[in-house]
Structures are given as C-alpha cells and as structure tokens.
Image (cartoon, rainbow, N blue to C red):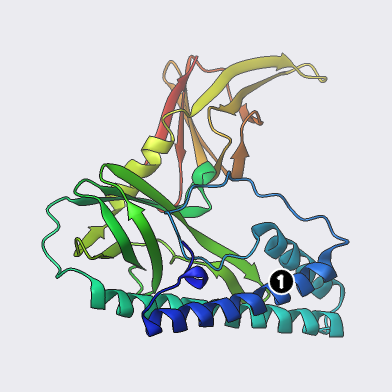
Amino acid sequence: MELHSLHSSDGDINYISSSCAATIEDLIKQMEALEATLKSKPLPSTSHPPLEPIVGVITSECPVGLLAAAAQMLDEQQKQNDKKSDWTQIEREKLARISTDEDAIQADRLLLTKVAAKYAAPPIENNDQITIQFHPAWGPTGPNDLLQLTNNGRDLSDCTVLVELANANGETYQNVHFIKNWPKNTTLLTAYSQGTQIVDQILNRFTVTNPKTISVKILSPQFSTRLLCNFTANDRDNSIARRCEKLRIIGACESKQALLGSRVNFVSLTLDGLAFIPKGQIELLIQRGTLSRQIRISFPQWIQGEPKHIRLPFMPDAARVVISFPDTDYQYTTNIR
C-alpha cells in the first residue's frame, strides 16, 4: 500500500496521505514536462530486471531510463557549449523541482513512523523473529543495494518498517515501508537505488555509498522490535563470492605465425556465466620450466562473451588467472591449460 493512498480515522495519517498525494501530483507534472522535452530522444534501457519490492513500499522513484536520458542530453549540451544555454537552465529548474518533491515525500514518509508508534506494541527483544540479509550493489546484480527481511514469528498487519543505512563516513539515509499484511514464514525484498547523476545533483537515490550499518525498526500492533546489521568487509567479500559462483573464464594459450616470420604467443580469455562483471584487474601468472612472468591488465567492465587477448613473452606450460575487484578482498582464480 502506498503512502498517498492511505485512509484512516486518524487525522495525522490523513494529513500525511493528502500531503504526499499533492506532492506526487506535482512530481508527475514535472516529469511529464521533462519527458515532453526529451521525447525526440531514445531513452536508454535499464540493464537490470525489475525486482519485487517489499509489499506496499513507499517510493518516489523516477523512471531510470528518463533520468539517464536527461543526464546524457545535458552533458552533451554542456560539451558543445561552454556557456549554460537557456534550454539547460530550464531543464535544471525542472530537475531541481523534482528533487524538492522527492525531499517532501521523504519527509512525509518519516512522519508516518511517528504516527505508527502510537498504535504499535511495546518494543521487545527480537530473538530472531525477524532476520535480515543485505547484499550491496555489485556487477550484474546491481545497481541497487538489496535488503531481505524474513518474518520467522507470527503474522503481522499494519506494519511500518523504518530502515536506516549508514556508512563509515557518517552518511545516512532512511527508508520507510508500510506493509498491510506480512504473513509468518515469508521473506520480503526491496531494492535501494544508488541514484542517477543529473548535472550537479543526484536524483532517485535511496541508499548511501558502501553501507556499513543497517538498522531496522519494526512497528506493528502485534510486535515491535529493533534489528541491527553490521555489514563488514568480510560480509561484502562473501556476498560477492556467492554472486560469482557461476562465473567462468574460458581460456587457451595459442601461438601463431606472424607476417614477418616470428611467432606470436598469446592467451585468449572469455567471460562466461555472468552477464558482466564490474571494474577489475586480471593478473596472469605464466610459467615454463624455471621461467615465470606476471602480467596485469585492468578493465572498466567485462561483458559475457567478450574475448580478451593478452600477448605473452613465451609459450607457457601452465597459466593461472586471478581476477580482483576494488573494495573487496575476494578474488576469482582459475587455471588455463
């Protein structure tokens, strides 16, 4: 159930609902005006499948493709013209209005938690009645942080969930969800967008960079509690390792005759098993007898089926491939015959 569609005998809830509805109406107008300007441009498609959100998630997300198109068009115009044109200024004003509306809806969400506390049961120890799993944005499962909540206890109704994400730099963001009915033994999933950079601001963002702490507050008439998840570097490594379980590198060392008579040795590596992997580094270790060599190359992204050819100083008897990524100690290792 969405915030703007709530109806209640409680005056505070009705006020929040009507305020949110008015803001959403203005947000839609601004988005339609922006879309009218961009309608002659093809909108980029999103590379990630839609995710099933928590039941009744309260969200003010703007279309990802539309925001990406706006960012691209504004960037291209800035490159063509050092001075900010009237068109750019107009679009900047529309985007600023959208950002203001997003902030207003966020304020309405947070007010809902104060009202929910009036009707909630007294908070007690969780005792694993609600369990939490967090998966940070990474590779083909990105660009969203994923939060998973499982109800291991009793059936819950009219449940308000406050989720606060925080990182090591002190940055925080709070998300509020209203769940009309949450049966026992069910798991709910929600995705928190990293946002889209538009000129000098980020829109559609519902998380922080590299969350380290996830605090969850459950408020319902049947059960209220708090959960705290400390997401460590080891947790991040394990999360990425699980997502790389299907990763495969298909490789072969080859030697071919060059035009000038000498032979050229190289290794061909092709990504398989995942749609793509993000920015990383390939470390190639080759050996023949007592000879050994280490070769490193970096890549911004590696797409499934894309071959990478690395020239070798000699034809090896054995080769080992190690792939590493920023912000994690996880490494993928395989041998090439």
Image position of 288 with respect to 214: above or below? above
Foreground residue, 188 or 22?
Answer: 22
- Image coordinates of residue 193 in percent, x first then y, are 51, 60
Q: Residue at x 58, y 43 (%)?
A: 49
- Image coordinates of residue 284 in percent, x first then y, are 50, 31
Foreground residue, 98 or 332?
Answer: 98
Position of residue 185 in the picture relative to residue 137 (left or right): left
Image position of 147 with respect to 317: above or below? below
Image position of 281 with respect to 255: above or below? below
Within the image, what quadrant is residue 76 found in?
Answer: bottom right
Q: Which residue is mark 1?
A: 31
Within the image, what quadrant is residue 195 found in?
Answer: bottom right
Which amino acid is tagged 1? Answer: Met
Q: Can residue 112 be seen by looking at this rendering? A: yes
Q: Can residue 329 be seen by looking at this rendering? A: no
Q: Residue at x 60, y 44 (%)?
A: 301
Q: Residue at x 84, y 71 (%)?
A: 37
Neighbours of disc 1 within 10 Å: few (<14), some (14-19), many (20+): some
Position of residue 179 in the picture relative to residue 123 (left or right): right
Position of residue 316 in the picture relative to residue 257 (left or right): left
Report helix, strand or loop for mark 1.
Answer: helix
Q: Residue at x 72, y 76 (%)?
A: 29
- Image coordinates of residue 295 in percent, x first then y, are 52, 35
